[in-house]
Amino acid sequence: MEQARVVIAIVLSLLVFLVWNYFFTPQPPVNTKPPESVDQKSEPQAPLVAEPTTPAASAPAAGTSAKPEPIGLPQETGAPARKVTIETPLYRVVLSERGGVFSRFVLKNYKEKMGADAPLKEMIDQDLKSGIFQIGFANQSIPNLGTAVFRIDNEQETVSIKDEPVAVSCTWTSGQGLAVTKEFVFDPQSYLIDMRVRVANDPGQALADSLWVSMGKLFEEEKRMYGFTGASTYMNGKLEQVALKKIAESEPMTGKMQWMALQDRYFILSLVPKNENQGTLKIGMGPDGVVENRYTKPSQAFGTESPQSEFQIYIGPKSLKLLKSYNNDLDKAINFGWFDIIARPLLYLMNYIHDNLVANYGIAIIILTIITKIIFWPLGNKSYKSMAEMKKLQPLIAEIREKYKGDKQRMNQETMALYRTYKVNPMGGCLPMVVQIPVFFALYRMLYEAIELRHAPFMGWITDLSAPDRLGNFSFSIPLMEPPYGIPVLTLVMGVSMLLQQKMSPPAGDPTQAKMMMIMPVVFIFIFINFSSGLVLYWLVNNIISIGQQYYTQKKHA
């Protein structure tokens, strides 16, 4: 029992180390296709996902054949296509007549990386030649619609939207009475974009098929991190997430779909059906690493008075507060896994502190740490009191060890009898460490994925709380350290604080265990060396407060 504190410390260290080793080891690159030249990008690629064969996607309307004959003239795949740029205060989107898709989408309030000269965040990789939000029909009633040339109703090359929402339509016509229109409504005050799809058909022509909408994303090569990256959906009242490595084996999902999304650490592309959300979702990956979500509606007949299909598009930051305000369940895309029940309140509290008390997320993390420490203060007092009592017993324990060093069983019996005599619980000092494990991982997950910390400065050399702290920039590499290479000041100070805590704690009776305990701070330095500076800041402040509380308690019970 007296080695319990050592065992708990080792277990905690191994847990953190295993998490770090698992989530920070490189994974095979998602995009294995070499970059193409600008000339090669001129023609859009075909959709990636095979046509769904589920009943919702392929069931014909009453009185129609299972495989309708194609309607309309051959598509004008070689015809010239304009591109119109829509500017709002929040984003810039390029609408291409080739397929009537978004070919570019730039967020104006976010950059690709740190730096005054860094480019704005591009949400559509330029290797994704097909653009996003293609439409088509599952049974190919109108073949090659994704590469058809739609005509945009606005003659301007750039549409600037500042005050009121503006609608921009693009239409493809067959010349035989068939017209397909995609209308987008851009709101200057919101990341939400309305999309309406209308199919008007000549009464003399039969058209019954399943409309689909797709979007794709080329995920960047990145290390496997502690957070979700891939395709997700909220279907039948349940969040479904398909990580990149699981996409190849994913099966079509049928039911009531609230939204589908492609998301990485900080940003999300999503489509939200509005009027009819029954259908089938198929997730696939092309040979070049492009992941595509395709939502297919149930089959319907299209005529002159066909109901339009309405959707909402969201392309932007994974901000919990922002997504929650839209009331479309898209906030459920932000999920912190097992620790979501702890991480969400911590995120709300951190943002509240930042928005109402201090305009610095580093200070907000410090205040958040103090609040969590206050919550655990009574438990900490009890534990530190137990540790102080253990420390007073060390001379007596040393005598028992010396007296019975040749008889371990008797040594343990006498030691336990000593604890019972003085009513000391040897496990009492371990409680804070055990309790902090779920809080630590919840904070780690939250601080790792919080868009608010991306490129958020704290002070001095810490200019990005979502990145590891580095003072300076060395030209040489350092083992176990990820670039950039520099002095991890916060991490080193955190290690010193842990060493000080070890000095204040009752020493382990066994010399080998005592040495292991003293090595723990060094182990934690190497574990934390690549963690975000926001998380290291939390751990450092937590240690400093713990040192103060431990010092006060030990003095009180000396």
Image (cartoon, helix red, strand yellow):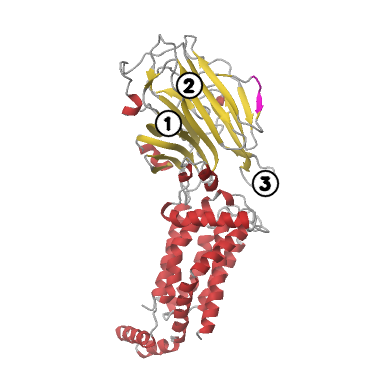
- To which residue does mark 1 refer? 294
> Does 208 lie within the magenta span?
no
Q: Position of residue 154 (x, y in %)?
A: 62, 21
Q: Dot 2 lies on which element?
A: strand
What amino acid is at disc 1? Arg
Q: Dot 1 lies on which element?
A: strand
Asked if the residue at tag 1 contacts the one at tag 2, i.e. Cβ–Cβ closer than 8 Å, the answer is no
- To which residue does mark 2 refer? 198
Closer-to-camera residue (364/534):
364
Q: CA distance from mark 2 to mark 1?
A: 18 Å
Range of magenta residues: 155-159
- Structural crowding at the residue carrying mark 2, measured as other residues with C-alpha within 10 Å and reported as few (<14), some (14–19) or many (≥20): some
> Does 156 lie within the magenta span?
yes
- To which residue does mark 3 refer? 115
As drawn, 57 above or below 79:
below
Q: Residue at x 51, y 17 (%)?
A: 172
Q: Residue at x 53, y 72 (%)?
A: 546
